[in-house]
Image (cartoon, rainbow, N blue to C red):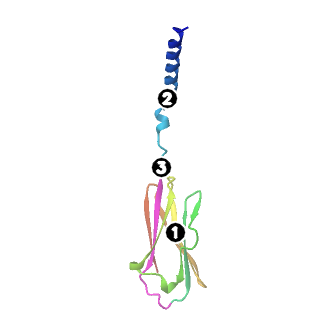
Amino acid sequence: MIHFLPTTLLVFVVVCLATSCKKESPANNKLPVAASFRTLRFILYTNKNFSNSNDSISFALHISNAQTTIKFDSTVFSAKVKDIPNKAHQLVFEKRIPDDGTIVAADFFYRIENVGMSWYLDSCAANEKLKVIEYLFQ
């Protein structure tokens, strides 16, 4: 029985070492792929003198592809037409959206009180990571 104990102990140690040292396969070590995004930068300004225009104006931004529309939380700028800034004080809004590999339409939508509404439409190609949409309000 004394001769049996060292063999049993040796087998036990070998089994413990063999089961405790598991190597993970390379597939389990892969880092998650970062989501791909693109950035749309909207720039708004005017070079005209609207100092006599007290009409209220509000601007909203819309982004859409064939499947969905992404809206900003609310109106991005609301003021009197005379208060639309010049180029030196331009307003800049950025929106990061998932890059799903599609063409994206992006527009400034604006409404002038007691006048009506209109928009300025542009697009972002499927491979563009940064699109600047500059709108010179006239």
Residue that badge 1 annotates: 107
**Regarding mark 2 in the picture, which secondary structure is present there?**
loop
Tell me which amino acid carries mark 1: Asp
Q: Nearer the viewer, mark 3 or mark 2?
A: 2
Which label is found at residue 135?
Answer: none
> Which numbered disc flags the more N-terminal residue, 3 or 2?
2
Please indicate whether residue 51 sits to the left or right of residue 117 in the image: left
**Regarding mark 1 in the picture, which secondary structure is present there?**
strand
Tell me which amino acid carries mark 3: Ala
Query: Which contiguous range is marked in magenta?
Result: 34-52
Quadrant of the drawing holding the N terminus:
top right
Total count of labels: 3
Residue that badge 3 annotates: 34
Which label is found at residue 22?
Answer: 2
CA–CA distance between discs 1 and 3? 28 Å
Q: Nearer the viewer, mark 1 or mark 2?
A: 2
> Which numbered disc flags the more N-terminal residue, 1 or 2?
2
CA–CA distance between discs 1 and 2? 55 Å
Tell me which amino acid carries mark 2: Lys
Residue 7 x, y percent position in the rendering = 51, 12
* 125 is within the stretch colored magenta: no
Residue 59 x, y percent position in the rendering = 54, 75
Q: Residues within 10 Å of mark 3 (few under 14, many from 20)?
A: few
Q: Nearer the viewer, residue 116 or 92?
A: 92
